Image (tube, coloured by chain):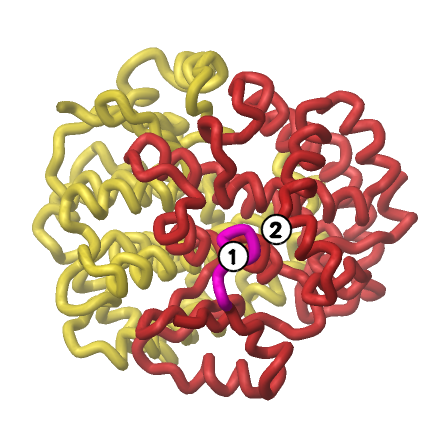
Chain colours: A yellow, B red
Amino acid sequence: MRYELYYWSGIQGRGEFVRLALEEASVDYLDAARTEGGDMKMMRLMKSERAHPSFAPPFLKAGSLLIGQTANILLFLGERHGLAPKSNAGRFWTHQLQLTIADLIAEVHDSHHPIAGSLYYEDQKAEAARRTKYLRDERLPKYLGYFDRLLATGNGGWLVGNRVTYADLSLFQAVEGLRFAFPKTMRELERRCPQLSRHSARVGGRQRIAAYLGSDRRLPFTNEDLFRHRSELDS
Amino acid sequence: MRYELYYWSGIQGRGEFVRLALEEASVDYLDAARTEGGDMKMMRLMKSERAHPSFAPPFLKAGSLLIGQTANILLFLGERHGLAPKSNAGRFWTHQLQLTIADLIAEVHDSHHPIAGSLYYEDQKAEAARRTKYLRDERLPKYLGYFDRLLATGNGGWLVGNRVTYADLSLFQAVEGLRFAFPKTMRELERRCPQLSRHSARVGGRQRIAAYLGSDRRLPFTNEDLFRHRSELDS
């Protein structure tokens, strides 16, 4: 069976967290909007679905299953492809970490769109500057310090036990995105979070992940995406 | 086994979504911070936990398991107490809806705190007014319309199949909270979403939920909570 991932064709966005899991699991998947019919077809499909319509992309077609919400898709892929432990303790802990990463991502998004997603950045620039100061000074240190401590406590180099999980892949993507968006801030934060840098290198160096990152399936970071680099927001 | 729920003692907040599930499941639980040692003891426990520390309350102690993140706790309780279907299609769909409700809740919170959770409302009042206008005009109609359509499509009166799930309880709490925060806006929106009002009445009328809502275990809505009523934000 071939999975079909539906996500906006031009950005990494939240779809990228799913892509990394699909790549690490080495399963056959179609990145549907990028290869067949584009975003319009995806949105028509989403809006015409009656049984399990998603509120927004990404969503994954897996045979007769249609699954939306990034963390929920990862929960599914984690169970099915060994990207999370099977024990109750392990699988709920992995999902808890994923949901915390999702909270971080939402805060990062809202730092450049603190008023409305439907407005241009330029129309909420003053508010973005004010919000991003708190993101840099309070929230990023809190989130990254949390994950750094978890990695320091574990002894396998991974977030959960001694095997890679979907939460590791997502943390990698979050750190990569933050490096793109806030290079100056991240240089300082990574000095204080050495485990985090090591963890990112370890994930990025995995064979399948490295192959994916070097392929044309991996879209670049851009300023029209979840993580945006605006120098005025990084100092 | 008695569950121990850890959440801020003075507010409904995100803990309330867990409380509603515990009450509907009719299981023995201790609302720990409200009954033993308060918020300080909870935070000491959270910070001293080495294996599975939460980033923030709520978290649930269930025997040897410690589970954080609201939607994750509900995933656990749903499996264990029949508050979600057992089939893959049903359990991922229920969780998808819960995560969409979580997104709505986060947007509602940020409408009164668009700059930083660490600042007073009064220090971000102008930004809150601007953000809340988009919440009222764009986001609430989109979210509530989505759930109203789902309820209209189903035929059991519940979000998933013909039995109550944790997502129904959470949607109820979201609608109750929105009625408290934005009574004027909600009068208009509920006119356009008749299924949603019916659904809320159905959940609120369930025997165990009604008993809980009438008990002193249910904290009132206040302006120091997730849902806040500020008349200047409701028109």
Which of B139/B34 is in front?
B34
What element does badge 1 sit on? Answer: loop
Any magenta on residue A192? no
What element does badge 2 sit on? Answer: helix
Q: Chain of mark 2?
A: B
The residue wearing badge 2 is B208
Q: Residues under labels 2 and 1: Cα distance?
A: 7 Å
Mark linked to residue A210: none
Q: Tell me where residue A90 appears, x and y as whole percent.
A: 24, 62
Q: Tell me where residue A149 appears, x and y as whole percent.
A: 34, 78
Q: Tell me where residue A129 appears, x and y as whole percent.
A: 66, 57
Magenta highlight range: B23-28
Mark linked to residue B26: 1
Any magenta on residue B26? yes
The image quarter containing residue B121 is bottom right
Image point (67%, 56%), residue name: B212
Q: Residue furthest front?
A: B207
Disc 2 + disc 1, Cβ < 8 Å: yes
